[in-house]
Image (cartoon, rainbow, N blue to C red):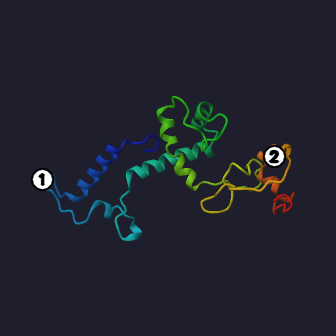
């Protein structure tokens, strides 16, 4: 489950086996279903048993692999995938590409999930683009939505590639209000 997306039918079969184990006393007994499986699958904090939704769990494990590709670029897997699938970008923004491998197709399926909760942490980073990355401090993080630019066409080309660090003073702790 950490490497490949299980088909929905396989997940349903596993859930069926878990339910049979939970409800049946022996092979010959039909068992008594006191509550529905959906009811028992709710979190323990709600007083239920907290059985996992296997499809969501599978997607979360694939998201963990995607996160490792992004944060541990020195691993062999990250180097191979980067050279094949996201040479000019990062794993989070990489397209599926043409003729992707089964492994990349499965890991790529978790991109939307990771994007929902991911944001750029600025720190002293000088690579965060003002316009194309989610860096504003809301939850979930947002990109700059609209801007009123009052500059010449030659300056607009420079502004398109503007980094967040350029909006800060030299000390890196305060905004350059004139630029903003």
**Label 1, label 2: how many angstroms apart (C-alpha)?**
75 Å
Q: Residues within 10 Å of mark 1 (few under 14, many from 20)?
A: few
Q: Residue at x 81, y 56 (%)?
A: 167
Q: Residues within 10 Å of mark 2 (few under 14, many from 20)?
A: few
How many numbered badges does the structure rendering display? 2
Task: Classify 48 as above or below 84.
Answer: below
- Is 115 on the left-hand or right-hand side of 166? left
| x and y, in percent, of residue 70 in the image | 61, 44
Q: Nearer the viewer, mark 1 or mark 2?
A: 2
| x and y, in percent, of residue 6 in the image | 39, 42
- Quarter of the image containing the C terminus? bottom right
Mark 2: secondary structure: helix
User: Label 1, on which residue?
Assistant: 28
Q: Residue furthest top?
A: 99
Mark 1: secondary structure: loop
| x and y, in percent, of residue 4 in the image | 44, 40
Q: Residue at x 46, y 44 (%)?
A: 2
Task: Classify 39 as above or below 6.
Answer: below
- Is 176 on the left-hand or right-hand side of 33? right
- Quarter of the image containing the N terminus? top left
Q: Which mark is residue 44?
A: none
User: Label 2, on which residue?
Assistant: 156
Examine the image and state in which quarter residue 148 appears: bottom right
The answer to whether marks 1 and 2 mark residues whose Cβ atoms lie closer than 8 Å is: no
| x and y, in percent, of residue 85 in the image | 59, 33
- Is 159 on the left-hand or right-hand side of 21? right
- Is 165 on the left-hand or right-hand side of 81? right
């Amino acid at each position: 489950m950490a490497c490949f997306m299980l088909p929905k039918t396989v997940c349903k079969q596993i859930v069926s086996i878990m339910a049979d184990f939970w409800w049946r006393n022996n092979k010959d007994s039909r068992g008594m279903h006191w509550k529905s499986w959906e009811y028992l699958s709710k979190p323990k904090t709600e007083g239920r048993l907290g059985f996992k939704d296997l499809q969501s769990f599978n997607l979360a494990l694939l998201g963990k692999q995607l996160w490792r590709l992004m944060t541990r670029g020195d691993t062999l897997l990250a180097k191979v995938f980067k050279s094949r699938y996201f040479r000019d970008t990062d794993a989070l923004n990489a397209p599926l590409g043409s003729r992707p491998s089964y492994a990349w197709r499965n890991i790529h399926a978790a991109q939307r999930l990771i994007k929902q909760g991911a944001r750029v942490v600025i720190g002293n980073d000088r690579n965060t683009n003002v316009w194309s990355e989610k860096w504003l401090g809301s939850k979930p993080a947002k990109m700059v939505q609209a801007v009123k630019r009052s500059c010449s066409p030659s300056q607009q080309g420079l502004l398109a590639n503007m980094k967040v660090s350029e909006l800060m003073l030299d000390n890196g702790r305060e905004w350059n209000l004139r630029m903003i």
